[in-house]
Image: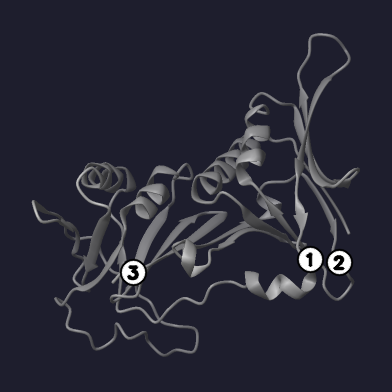
Amino acid sequence: MRFRAKIVDVACLNHFSRVVNTIAKLAKTCALRLTVNKLYFILCDKVANGGVSMWCELCQGNFFDEYQMEGVAAEHNEIYLELVPENLSRALKTAQSAKAVKIKLTNKHCPCLRVAVELPSLSSSSRIVTHDIPVGVIPRRLWSDFREPIVPDFDVSIYLPVLKTMKSVVERMKKLSNFIVIEANLSGEMNLKIETDLVSVTTHFTDLGNPPWASEDGCQSSAQGRDLESMAEARIDIKRLQQLLAGQQVNPTKALCNIVSKRMVHFILLHEDVSLQYFIPALA
């Protein structure tokens, strides 16, 4: 099992750093899945912990100048590691003015991701700062726990308003309640609502637009045949939503939300070379 990669391009390095930062804000620990073409950051929280799931997919070719990996076996050419994304994020923070960053899977005393940051120096010798980030190797029998979450059959799919605007609304609402109701319809309208014994606050968004979804096999989701004005809603933990919005350092080119009435809200943030899916279960 081997893995080594190198980033030389500053823009790619900063972009990768922003992605890892976003992941660190969403998950204390997560799985890093390495394949020949892609990297994935995966969180599958048990329902007891709030049951949030995350699936972030990156094409390695858009970030790394060099990338080599050999998986567990020829027919299973993948590596699954468990890591604390905050540690990787911290290591990459030291790399902001780096000439190059090398990442390598090592196993001295325990399995580690070694991040070697080559900093520019005035003399001919270069300065290298090395971070060893402990990782756990996830055995193959557990890989099936980290499959891509199935996109639920949603009632409504809608584009999100500008994330900054949404973030400031949610931050204000969080001071008043621990829960938020997200509701939307197929006419491009979305409401964020909180209701407590003392106060009821709703923010309305209109003209957001609805994505033209069709599932893989050509059947439409249960959104088909729905009354365009009728709202689908889910009540979720406001902290989870705030985490998602506060962690956004990858400005997505598209951001949308699928609502499975009273069951789940599924967010999809797309950037040209990164896609992030985040699932928040509804509360009764």
Looking at numbered disc 1 in the image, what kind of residue is underneath it? Glu
| Numbered disc 2: secondary structure | loop
Residue at mark 2 to residue at mark 1: CA–CA distance: 6 Å
Question: Would residue 12 be seen by someone viewing this image from the given angle?
Answer: no
Residue at mark 2 to residue at mark 3: CA–CA distance: 37 Å
N-term-proximal mark, 2 vs 3: 2
Residue at horizontal 58%, vertical 41%? 15
Task: Locate residue 128, reporting x and y percent.
Answer: 82, 24
Disc 1 marks which residue? 78
Tag in front: 3 or 1: 3
| Mark 2 surroundings within 10 Å by alpha-carbon count, few (fewer than 14), some (14 through 19), many (20 or more) | some
Residue at horizontal 16%, vertical 59%? 206
Disc 2 marks which residue? 72
Tag in front: 2 or 3: 3
| Numbered disc 3: secondary structure | loop
Residue at horizontal 41%, vertical 51%? 244
Looking at numbered disc 2 in the image, what kind of residue is underneath it? Val
Please report contact status of discs 2 and 1: CB closer than 8 Å, yes or no.
yes
Residue 119 higher or lower than 248, as above or below: above
Disc 3 marks which residue? 282
Residue at mark 3 to residue at mark 1: CA–CA distance: 33 Å
Pick the residue in front: 237 or 154. Answer: 237
- The quadrant of the picture occupied by the C terminus is bottom left
Task: Locate residue 237, reporting x and y percent.
Answer: 33, 58
Q: Exactly how many numbered labels are in the figure? A: 3
Query: Residue 205 is drawn in which quadrant?
Result: bottom left
Left or right for 271, reference 241: right
Task: Locate residue 266, reporting x and y percent.
Answer: 40, 67
Residue 73 higher or lower than 63, as above or below: below
Residue at horizontal 29%, vertical 86%? 224
N-term-proximal mark, 2 vs 1: 2
Looking at numbered disc 3 in the image, what kind of residue is underneath it? Ala
